[in-house]
Amino acid sequence: MTIDHYGMTNVFRLLFGMFSFMRSFVGLVLIVLLVAGLWKMFQKAGEPGWTSIIPFVNTYKLFKIGWGNGWLFLLGIIPVVNFIVYIVLSLKLAKAYGMGVGFGIGLIFLPSIFYIILGFSGARYYGPAR
């Protein structure tokens, strides 16, 4: 067992490399699932699915689906207001897809996972919550 000038053994380097690879692989899989979930969400709402790939356009579409007015996404630029707006957006998105407040809270705290659930579940789009 050899130790380099950083104090790491070759075994440690191998384990660290395997961990880094697995973390990157899992992250890539989650990103692909998130894009696919958003794609399906947008299609359920009658929007083109490819807009889930474009950064600001997907936020505009999320606001359009949840609020009925996509230009409200500009409120996300205002520092303190953006927290409140995204909380309300999550609750409105849950309602627009026929889900309850609990699902909206899930969208607030774990949006990536709950977007995937919304996209691949049997949830129907009922229109912006009024």
Image (cartoon, grey):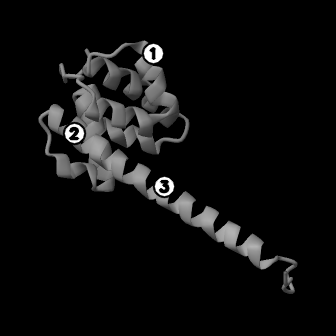
The image's mark for residue 102 is 1
Q: Quadrant of residue 64?
A: top left
Q: What is the CA distance from the residue labelled 1 to the residue labelled 2?
A: 21 Å
Viewed as shown, does residue 75 lie left or right of 122?
right
> Residue 34 placed where, x, y %?
36, 46
* Residue 93 appears in the rendering: yes
Q: Amino acid at mark 1?
A: Gly
Camera-side mark, 1 or 3: 3
Classify mark 2: residues with Cα within 10 Å, few (<14), some (14-19) or many (20+). many
Near-viewer residue (27 or 42): 27
Q: Amino acid at mark 3?
A: Gly
Mark 1, secondary structure of its residue: helix
Classify mark 1: residues with Cα within 10 Å, few (<14), some (14-19) or many (20+). few
Near-viewer residue (122 or 89): 122
Pointer 3 residue? 27
> Residue 59 placed where, x, y %?
32, 44
Viewed as shown, does residue 130 lie left or right of 43?
right
Q: What is the CA distance from the residue labelled 2 to the residue labelled 3?
A: 20 Å
* Image quarter of the N terminus: bottom right
Dot 1 or dot 2: first in sequence order is 2
> Residue 38 placed where, x, y %?
29, 42
